[in-house]
Image (cartoon, rainbow, N blue to C red):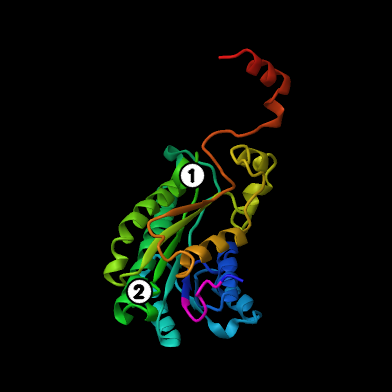
Amino acid sequence: MIDTALEGRTVLVTGAAGGIGRALAEAFAAEGANLLLLANAGDAALRGWLAGQPWAGRALAARADVTRPAELEQAVAAGLERFGRLDACIVNAGVWPPDDLRLDELPEERLRSTIEINLLGALWTVRAFFGALRRTGPGPGGQGASVTFIGSTAGRFGERFHVDYSVTKAALRGAVLSLKNEIVLLDPYGRVNMVEPGWTVTPMAEPALAEPGTIERVLRTTPVRQLARPEDIARAVVFLSSPALARHVSGEILTVAGGMEGRVQWDPGQIDPDRVRARLEEGP
């Protein structure tokens, strides 16, 4: 078994009540980490789920709205009181409004809310984590603190009718490239990276995926013909958070999307094998 060196380290996870959030908690718990799990609307559900986990004694659940810096500061303070320090921060909280709307149809309230949660909430989260790191200083052994954002392929390829979502995820790329140069001022071995999922089967995505034709459409640009599971994302985050496996990886974006590209990869109904062969025989 590979040693991730995460045992005994404390990991902050926002959006911990969601599908990816719970998978993150389970993945880090399996590595022996302590967990500070934050949720807002799903706080009660998170606490109920956590109570049934065999590793619940190594976790603390707290309610915090990521759009409210004071609540994040309070939750981080509770984590410091319980565990003594925070070693890793997983910026996972976010929303994907399901209604398909062009920008000119987009209500001002939705645009502001998505940016407030997905972008400003992410920055407020790291700000609170940096504050904790400033107070405690680097951890023992020079293992280095880490931040991992959960982005989206929408930030790379865009997403029609969801410009509010795609611009927030695109902006996180700039955050990664900037904050990797700031965290080292607090911890000389600190690192900042991002995992960029494609379509992942979570409660947030399931209604859209249940619509006829959606799965076929979203996989047309994906060579690996399957959807991601939350566990796929969590394992990538564990890798980037590990001071043993990714000790020299910073400022990077790891896409976990089955090789997704911004172009159609396959469509069985539109491929004529005989025509393809004939075209090859024609030469240049």
Residue 142 vs residue 164, the one in the foreground? 142
Residue 79 on image: x %, y %: 43, 81
Measured as percent of width and height from the top left, residue 106 is found at: 45, 43
Mark closest to the chain's N terminus, 1 or 2: 2
Horizontal arrangement in the rendering, residue 123 relative to residue 20 (left or right)? left
Left or right of residue 150: residue 279: right
- In contact (CB < 8 Å): disc 1 and disc 2: no
In the shown orientation, is residue 64 left or right of residue 134?
A: right
- Identified at 40% across, 81% down, the residue is 85
Q: Is residue 201 above or below residue 39?
A: above
Q: Quadrant of the C terminus?
A: top right
- The amino acid pointed to by label 1 is His
Judge whether residue 179 can be spotted in this image. yes
| Mark 1 surroundings within 10 Å by alpha-carbon count, few (fewer than 14), some (14 through 19), many (20 or more) | many
Any mark on residue 40, and which?
A: none
Measured along the vertical axis of the image, is residue 201 above or below residue 185?
above
Q: Are there few (<14), some (14-19), or many (20+) residues within 10 Å of tag 2? A: some
Q: Tell me the quarter of the image containing the N terminus.
A: bottom right
Left-right relation of 177 to 194: left
User: What residue do we see at 42% from left, 66% from top?
Assistant: 247
Taking depth in this image into account, of 165 and 261 the one nearest to the observer is 261
- The residue that disc 2 covers is 70
Range shown magenta:
3-10
- Percent position (x, y) of residue 231? 61, 62
Q: Is residue 223 above or below residue 63?
A: above
Q: Is residue 92 visible?
A: no
The residue pinned by badge 1 equals 162
